[in-house]
Amino acid sequence: MSGDEQNQDVLQQQLKGKKLSGEKLKRYDSLDLESSRVPDAKKALEWSVILKLAFQSIGVVYGDIGTSPLYVFSTIFPNGVKYEEDILGALSLIFYTITLIPVVKYVFIVLQANDNGDGGTFALYSLICRYSKVGLIPSTQAEDKDVSTFKLDIPDRRTRRASKLKSILESSNFAKFFLLFATMFGTSMVIGDGVLTPCVSVLSAIGGVKAAAPSVMTEGRIVWLAVAILILLFFLQRFGTEKVGYTFAPILCLWFYSIAGIGIYNFVKYDPTVIRALNPKYIIDYFKRNKKDAWISLGGVVMCITGGEALFADVGHFSVRSVQISMCCVTYPALILAYLGQTAYLRKHSDDVTDTFYKNLPHSLYWPVFGVAVLAAIIASQALISGTFAIIQQSLALGCFPRVKIVHTSKKYHGQIYIPEINTLLMLACVVVTLAFRTTEKLSNAYGIAVVFVMLLTSCFLVLVMIMIWKTHIIFVIVYILVFGTIELVYLSSVLYKFDQGGYLPLAFAMVLMFIMYVWNYVYRKKYHFELEHKISPEKVQETVDETNYHRLPGLAIFYSELVHGIPPIFKHYVENVPALHSVLVFASVKSLPISKVPVEERFLFRRVKPYDLYVFRCVVRYGYNDVRNEAEPFERLLVERLKQFIQDDCKILIAANANRVSTDESIELENDGSNIDCDKQAEDATLLMERDIEVLERAYSVGVVHLVGEQDVIAGKGSNIAKRVVIDYAFNLLKRNLRQSNKVLDIPHKRMLKVGMIYEI
């Protein structure tokens, strides 16, 4: 049965119920009708597709965590090994850290908190916003909850704990701002990871040349070679995640097989008894022997899970199942075998701890493995670069980041994106950091802080999701907090110890990014509230138009606005200065929902502005933060087709309402042929009006579409304090002048675009 037939059945049942009860039929709003259309449930991916994505994910997600064997032992023991048994204690720490955090926490728990397939800090924030009113933009509508992807399966039994937490969040402005700031901070730290990962990985890999030929490769040459490799890496991003993944995946697979094979070789050759380090007793003994030094060395242990956050941030490029398969079947076993082999080697050669990876290689395999290691290190940067693109797209759609161009690099997988401006900025930042720090030791201090901060923040958000959305039993919530919260807090305390030795870098970087995000979000909210307070109601449109001696022009005009409730004040400004209206005018309110994707069938909601002969429509165009917006021509055609459907459905509802009114006005016992004739006449008139409206719309569309884009200049209002003037008049306007305008983001055709300017004092 088609969607229209289902709607008709529902409508007929409603009419029957109203007729029997003798009630007057309610005139259904078009938004209700449009939003009730829910397409078939999204089909699960086929296994062939999942396995392809799993293969691609190896080349994108695991480069960072996969190359950690290059430098972990050297960062744990920067001053050498004091006691022989410390090597077993370090292996035990590495084993349980990798098992508990990337595997248990991320692969099996955090990935379940994805937002319709997308992950990252903003995905968790969007879930919380969806289930409680903690968003700071008052743009929610009742119809939004009818979007199929807006809903999640939730238990029927609601606990007091979840309701109480929801009430606390909704009633506290501090909680709302705290969640937003925490999200911005986590996002900034992940972007900081995206800067530090390439530097650490590439410098670590190229260090093998210095070990083999120290007289040829000086520190300066290594640094400049690393810079050249980084520039090449960022140049490759424009080809997209799919091509990059297929290109990099075979290399990463070869890398994982290499380190696993070498690990087995060393394990068998040197000391198979290191397997006993899986007993956590060796961790306790390690701390008893070394005390404070053991605690400080945890900052080096953290390096074995760098890139763990990429498992979650990059899931939107692939799928949950594909990431789980690739991690459990390839990455995790290879890493454990590699660390077992390195530990076995160090048991016999503890003096080589500062360059464990290259020293433990069999002599005949040194240069082949070195070549693979360099390639793997280059690829290691891919995980956080792709993750950075994903979270910036999410923050952009939720009004927390300045406008940038989103390029969708795959027609099959909409989550695979590329952001040119961010790619360039990341490249420049990586080059500057590499030239400034020059060694992996200083960079690892900075890197550890960024990694642990993001992981701890993810745990905090996940606890809210577990309590409020999943309705998880309190015992499991407590266990999660005690296990993962304790581990991450201990690691955080350790990495902060080296704050003055490079650890300040990610925090300083995050502060700059947070300032930019806050400035943009602050003005975004102020501007929205200004438009909300000065909006033009649909009833006032006729009055506004009558005040000017306007003319009608042939064609369809689409007037863009972010205001959902009403018509923006810039329309009155436009009519007063250009007293000409196109034959059909659509106010398109582009709205971002805190969800990943909105099905095309549910994207457009329409209302008609009276009087009908004005041919003015309001339209809410709803997008998720991972939806494609930059295809102008398909957007125009889709909007017109959906508007035609709306006019037809509106006519059906009008005919049904008139038929019900006539039948309830007449006595049921008496037949009145006149009423039937009157009903038929009204139905015929309504059909003729519908056909005329569709004809007017088609004629206007055939003449041409004009895009009217409002460009609001924002200044601080009179009496504003100095801080507000600095934020609005200088910081925000500086960002706006140097970033893309809305027409470039939406890819509106330049020849058919008209900008309408207005100054807002906020």
Image: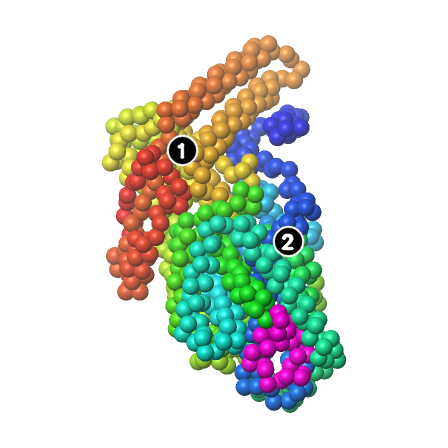
Q: Percent x, y for residue 480?
A: 66, 68
Task: Give the residue drawn at x 50%, y 81%.
Answer: 497
- Residue 287: quarter of image: bottom right
Q: Which residue is at the front of the view, 363 or 201?
A: 363
Kind of residue sitting beneath label 2? Ala
Q: What stretch is highlighted in magenta?
A: 338-365
Residue where numbered disc 2 is placed: 54
Q: Earlier in the sequence, mark 1 or mark 2?
A: 2
Q: Percent x, y for residue 653?
A: 55, 26
Residue 216 in the figure: left or right of residue 480: left
Can residue 582 be seen here? The reply is yes
Q: Tell me the quarter of the image containing the C terminus.
A: bottom left
Q: Does the magenta stretch include residue 199?
A: no
Residue where numbered disc 1 is placed: 586
Q: Which residue is at the front of the view, 500 or 566?
A: 500
Eye-nearest disc, 1 or 2? 2
Can residue 107 be seen here? The reply is no
Task: Give the residue drawn at x 68%, y 46%.
Answer: 48
**How many tags in the picture?**
2
Q: Which residue is at the front of the view, 356 or 409?
A: 356
